[in-house]
Image: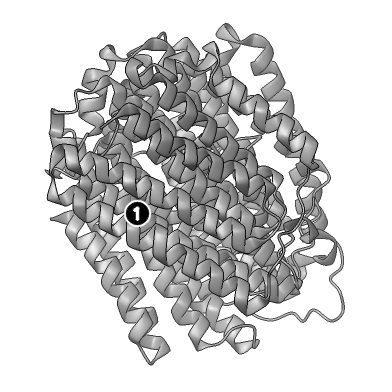
Amino acid sequence: MEFIIIISSLLIASLIAILAKHRIIVECVSISASAVALIESFVVAFKVALSGDYTPFAFFSVDALGALLMLIISCVGFAAVAYSIPYLRKETADNIIGFTRVKQYFTLFSLFLGAMFLAISSSSPIFAWIAIEATTLSTAFLISFYNKPSSMEAAWKYLIINSIGLLLGFFGTLLYFTSIDSSLGNGFISWHILTTNAIHMDPLLAKMAFVFVLIGYGTKVGLAPMHTWLPDAHSKAPAPISALLSGVLLNVALVIVLKFKIITDSVIDQSFSQTLLIVFGILSILISALIILSQKSYKRLLAYSSIENMGIIALGFGFGGLGVMAAILHTIYHSLIKSALFFLSGNFLLKYHSAKIANVKGALKALPITSILFLIGFFAITGAPPFGIFLTKLLTFSAGITVHPVITIMAILLTAIVFIGFFKHASAMVFGGKPSEIKEEKESTWLILPPLVLLILVLVLSFYQPPFLQVLIHNSTLYYK
Amino acid sequence: MNIFFLQFLLGILFLSIFYLHLAKKNFGAVIAYSIQSLIITLILLTSFLETNSFFLLFVVLVTLVIKVILAPIFFLRLIQRHKLTFSVSTYLNLPLTLIVLAGFTAIAHSQKFLSLTNIIPVHHALLSLALSAFFVSLFLIINRKDALSQAIGILSLENSIVAFAIFAGLEQSPMLQFGIIFDIFIWLVIATVFISMIYRHFGSLDTSSMKHLKD
């Protein structure tokens, strides 16, 4: 029932956004739908924590990691809608967009959220693929939202690269079906059937299938070297969409990779999938660290930070053991912090009308609360104590140092470079004198509240996780180790 | 169904994708895509004749309407509206392109991919050809500079995967196949809109001229 409520409320919100004649209706319906999704996600998460996998219909099934992802999608989704309303109002006031654009935005926004819920809760890998493809299709127009040549370029790149990636992922998915007797499941093959029949798969074919899946869905995850669409798309989309792309969508695609990893690991030694995750992980950290140092745009800076963090998560799953728990926790913290940082980047953009780091000076004077929160977010995302990412990095590197010491030391050095690069840019933006044309005005509470709540949530979760969340993290770790 | 007939159909599909690399005019490329989609529809029809599943017949009809009729119409209208007679050039010149294509075809038929092409041993030749079509389509997207050819390349890649799946016995339930085709249709609509927008913004479909985004 919960799924029907979540999906139908988002679909209805999307439909009303197309038909509505008044802005307030579009906004109220969108925020109500995301609130419903948030409540129902908590209901599903409690059910999974209490009784294990939740399968209300043949087409839907949620395990512990799926429940965690549903919570992330709904929390960030709700915060993104709450932030979008004042953000788009300000853009309308500045004559950047009109009402038609607002309608288009909320229509696609709800569809995007719905597609992510479907991808994560689908019991069939093909159904999940269709949903992941739907996330690409629903966000393409959100990336080209401002209808500028640069946003068009980013959107086309996003569409083509992700379509290639997803087709490769589709091909890899089909290869896993070779283990199945075609009479099973009436043609509807679930993750469960695939996992239980994996032993019948040719090991060499399993290796090829995983490579296709990792490269394919890895494109959507933003793992290097398939990451090239990510900085463009995340920097050109409206800030709340960047938050959802970076904080949520990358993780949704990663969960699909992990589901295939479990199947592959039951056919061949898990060192194969782990090695691949480590290679792509360290490459992602390396590329992002080098580019972050010389970055000129703060939105691209955040996008590259996402690539780095997805690399760390991939390393965690690659190292195994303690690294898996660290990766799951890192996923939660990264989603919340990165979304908050993208919201704050939206505040900078609204004030300075530029995404260039060089054009944002003295933000502490112009936007004091945003700047302080941005600095807090910077410390949180780079793994400074007391934030949870400090612990997850420590755990990941502890897990890695015994099995892959060289890679781990490399990763530690590279994350230090990321810290230096990020600090250089963040301090250049926040400190110093502000340009004279930038006025000192009271900051909008509604633009501050969503990132503030997310950062408080991260801080709380860094010290205390409620029992149901602990159960979900524990069960996810056991299953995906 | 006679395996030689299927091989003949798949051969035409492969040649149509091969032709996409050589096509200088967009009209020819669209017709080539239409032909390869018709081949896929015919191959799906043979599956229907073997199973007599009416759901599969529905999938065949939807494939026919979307891939053979609607997709070419969308692309031809685009060509007419923006007078896109000629396709933009490739990154590699023709001799190099042909060498790469020969290389991909040889690799697809090599021992390296035996585990893929021997999923159903009697279909080894068919699967090798479908895999060649897969690689050749992938290279088309990479090598072509214009947005229209890239879009046709994506759709050809999807056709190649469908062909591979059919001959490897990996067909999905008709409901999921319908979902996939519906996804492809939405993709097609969005890609067509984007191609039109790219032309309006850049004055051509040359994606190599898009250089606004750099680190």
Badge 1 element: helix
| Direction from residue A414 to residue A119 in the image, left or right | left
Residue beneath the point at 50% across and 17% down: B113
As drawn, which residue projects farthest toward the bottom? A21
User: Percent position (x, y) of residue A116?
Assistant: 37, 52
Q: Nearer the viewer, residue B37 or B139?
A: B37
Residue at mark 1: B181
| Direction from residue B81 to residue A414 in the image, left or right | right
Local crowd size for mark 1, using a 10 Å CA cut-off: few (<14), some (14–19), many (≥20): some
Q: Quadrant of the N terminus of chain A?
A: bottom left
Q: Nearer the viewer, residue A92 or A322?
A: A92
Residue type at mark 1 is: Ile
Q: Chain ID for label 1? A: B
Q: Quadrant of the C terminus of chain A?
A: top left
Question: Looking at the picture, does residue A456 appear above or below residue A8?
Answer: above
User: Percent position (x, y) of residue A200?
Assistant: 26, 13
Residue beneath the point at 14% across and 28% down: A184
Total tally of numbered discs in the picture: 1
Residue A338, visible in the rendered structure: no
